[in-house]
Image (cartoon, coloured by chain):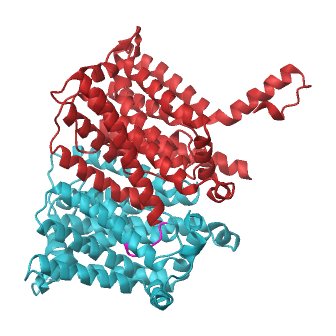
Chain colours: A red, B cyan
């Protein structure tokens, strides 16, 4: 990154330049973090007793949503979109709950690996269908939303099953201090272990390349087909982890897809990931998810009708994107 | 994407004899679609002998009409490379609003209110997509959340007065003339003619295709794209509102989530009918056949007596399969 900077420059201006660059690149995310911080302050004012317990509940409700948002980010970065994330999460959740019920803790480790593998396979099927049928992503994943939801219903007709104790303990309760929920740690660890290495590798670079200009990527020797499938596999992988987190936090598996697909699209857009592909990262969408959840919490504290909270989410989604594209339009002029 | 996964070999017509047939299909996409529909009808008859009758056809058409109207919203928006994901929320809302207002205000006023609200939703969608250049997917998704939330609030406000689907809607949505001609055809035929006329015979329609093909080019050639898009989404909203009347009449229920399950099929019907989600290509006649195909498929699946899970799996697979087969026939 710094290769272009003249080393003979004054150190102060150099630092300034790097800072400027950082700000320009991550302006959107920094803005989000600022909003989040302000929102925490507001929450504290609205509800002075908001403390470790509130943070704990927030982290548990954020965990599956954040994983869904990361899954969607992977698909969107490769210039796709995955509308089947909610169903894939439901599928992973019921498969894990059904297999772990009344089984030993050790067996559950196998189940977790199996479900992760399942997520990769399911995602690979989505990706392969998109690539080989040449039907637009949105249509294929729309149809697969039905398919995976149906498979989930076949696995478990009604909510049930169980979760291994260690898995539940991974997400419930605090770690070290009461202010640090395990769910938040789990989220950071999962993202750091999977996303960061990929982002820094050749694969990640290819993903961004295909997303921003697939023709250019193709001509520079990237296999567009393979990378497309890979991006959907990542989406499937994170959806499976999201489903596992649902099983872990609720203790059962639910075959009916939650609102995760739509929320993931909203989070991705709010998180500064371009729907046209190739721009953005996973940090923004995760922060956006926390903001949306915290906003909902605040509205409950203020005794606002939960239906109005839905309205607010819609308005925020539309409003933020409008402002974002206005900025973009002004920049172009 | 398509231009890249296309290897040079696959672009060459493989069977020169079939090339003529292929181009016929490409120019008249309705022909393979009608063929597929015929196959499905035969399949219905094979699975349940004696089921195909004028009455059965009437039931199929009656079921397909509201779906075809919603799919019409998708067709006209997809032609401009957009999509309208708020149609199901708007349709449910408009049916619900009429059912709750008809007691106090009478039917004409209730209908007017529902359609005005639908038009406002469409207007906001259009302003967002046209002026602010928000991706229509996001814009309409956000608006559907807003509509759903407000409809829920409205439901709580009106819960004490109770509600009922007006008899006129039930007659319009569910009744048959002579035992096999759905009454809703009387509403649908003019609507369908209007959409087709708009797409094929007006300057407005031509602009829609132009925007979908190349928005920048059409703007540079003097088209006021934001005005076109605003009008387009208003039309889409009003159409969705009308479909809501038929849904509430057909099912005799007024619920704020009534048409939710029709959202994905409406997009699927348009795609199966040959409308490109990427813009610039699509016909409403194809979409109507697409809606009929989906209706017959779901009737076949339910007559097979499979559990809901299997039906969902088959439905999803068929959408992919039909869309892929269609792509193979018409593209290349």
Residue B137 vs residue A42, the one in the foreground:
B137
Measured from the top left, where is residue B215 in percent x and y?
62, 67
Measured from the top left, where is residue B119 in percent x and y?
41, 63
- Dominant SS of magenta comes to loop
Magenta highlight on residue B48: no
Measured from the top left, where is residue B275 in percent x and y?
44, 73
Question: Where does the N terminus of chain B fall, quadrant-wise?
Answer: bottom right
Measured from the top left, where is residue B313 in percent x and y?
25, 58
Vertically, is A64 above or below B138?
Answer: above
Magenta stretch in the rendered image: B270-277
Vertically, is A247 above or below B93?
Answer: above
Image side of residue A84 versus residue A265, left or right: left
Q: Quadrant of residue B250?
A: bottom left
Vertically, is B42 above or below B96?
Answer: below
Residue A90 vs residue A298, the one in the foreground:
A90
Q: In which quarter of the image is residue A305?
A: top left
Image side of residue A183 versus residue A268, left or right: left
């Amino acid at each position: 990154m710094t290769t272009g900077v003249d080393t003979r420059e004054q150190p102060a201006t150099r630092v300034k330049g790097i800072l400027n660059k950082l700000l320009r690149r991550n302006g959107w995310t920094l803005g989000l973090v600022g909003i989040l911080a302000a929102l925490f302050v507001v929450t504290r004012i609205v509800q002075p007793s908001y403390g470790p317990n509130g943070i704990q509940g927030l982290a548990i409700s954020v965990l599956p949503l954040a994983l869904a948002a990361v899954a969607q980010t992977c698909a969107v970065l490769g210039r796709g979109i995955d509308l089947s994330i909610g169903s894939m999460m439901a599928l992973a959740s019921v498969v894990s709950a059904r297999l772990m019920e009344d089984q030993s803790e050790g067996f559950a480790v196998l189940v977790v690996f199996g479900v992760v593998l399942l997520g990769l396979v399911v995602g690979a099927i989505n990706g392969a269908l998109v690539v080989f049928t040449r039907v637009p992503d949105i249509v294929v994943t729309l149809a697969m939303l039905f398919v995976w939801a149906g498979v989930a219903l076949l696995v478990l007709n009604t909510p049930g099953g169980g979760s291994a104790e260690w898995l539940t303990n991974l997400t419930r309760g605090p770690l070290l201090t009461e202010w640090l929920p395990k769910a938040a740690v789990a989220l950071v660890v999962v993202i750091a272990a999977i996303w960061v290495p990929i982002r820094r590798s050749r694969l990640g670079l290819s993903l961004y390349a295909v997303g921003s200009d697939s023709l250019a990527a193709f001509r520079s020797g990237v296999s567009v087909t393979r990378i497309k499938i890979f991006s959907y596999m990542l989406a499937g992988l994170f959806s499976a982890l999201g489903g596992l987190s649902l099983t872990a936090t609720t203790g059962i598996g639910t075959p009916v897809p939650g609102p995760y697909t739509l929320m993931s699209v909203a989070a991705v857009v709010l998180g500064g990931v371009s729907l046209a592909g190739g721009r953005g990262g996973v940090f923004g969408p995760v922060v956006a998810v926390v903001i949306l959840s915290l906003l909902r919490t605040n509205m409950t504290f203020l005794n606002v009708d939960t239906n109005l909270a839905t309205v607010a989410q819609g308005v925020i989604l539309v409003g933020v994107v409008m402002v974002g594209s206005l900025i973009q339009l002004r920049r172009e002029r | 994407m398509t231009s890249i996964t296309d290897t040079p070999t696959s672009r060459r017509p493989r069977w020169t004899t079939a090339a003529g047939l292929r181009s016929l299909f490409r120019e008249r996409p309705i022909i393979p679609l009608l063929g597929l529909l015929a196959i499905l009808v035969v399949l219905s008859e094979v699975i349940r002998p004696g089921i195909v009758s004028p009455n059965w056809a009437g039931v199929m058409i009656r079921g397909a009409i509201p779906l075809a109207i919603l799919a019409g919203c998708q067709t006209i928006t997809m032609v401009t490379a957009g999509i309208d994901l708020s149609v199901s929320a708007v349709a449910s809302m408009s049916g619900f609003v009429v059912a709750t207002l008809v007691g106090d205000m009478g039917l004409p006023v209730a209908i007017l209110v529902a359609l005005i609200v639908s038009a406002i939703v469409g207007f906001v969608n259009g302003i967002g997509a046209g002026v602010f250049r928000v991706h229509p997917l996001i814009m309409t998704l956000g608006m559907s959340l807003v509509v759903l939330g407000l409809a829920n609030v409205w439901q709580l406000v009106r819960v004490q007065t109770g509600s009922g689907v007006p008899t006129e809607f039930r007659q319009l949505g569910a009744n048959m003339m002579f035992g096999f001609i759905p009454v809703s055809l009387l509403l649908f035929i003019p609507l369908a003619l209007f959409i087709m006329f708009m797409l094929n015979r007006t300057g407005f329609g031509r602009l829609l295709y132009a925007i979908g093909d190349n928005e920048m080019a059409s703007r540079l050639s003097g088209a006021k794209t934001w005005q076109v898009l605003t009008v387009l989404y208003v039309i889409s909203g009003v159409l969705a509102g009308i479909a809501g009347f038929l849904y509430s009449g057909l099912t005799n229920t007024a619920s704020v989530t009534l048409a939710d399950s029709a959202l994905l099929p409406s997009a699927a019907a348009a795609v199966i009918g040959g409308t490109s989600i990427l813009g610039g290509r699509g016909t409403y006649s194809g979409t109507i056949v697409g809606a009929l195909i989906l209706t017959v498929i779901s009737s076949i699946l339910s007559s097979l007596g499979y559990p809901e899970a299997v039906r969902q799996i088959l439905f999803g697979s068929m959408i992919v399969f039909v869309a892929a087969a269609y792509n193979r026939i018409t593209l290349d």
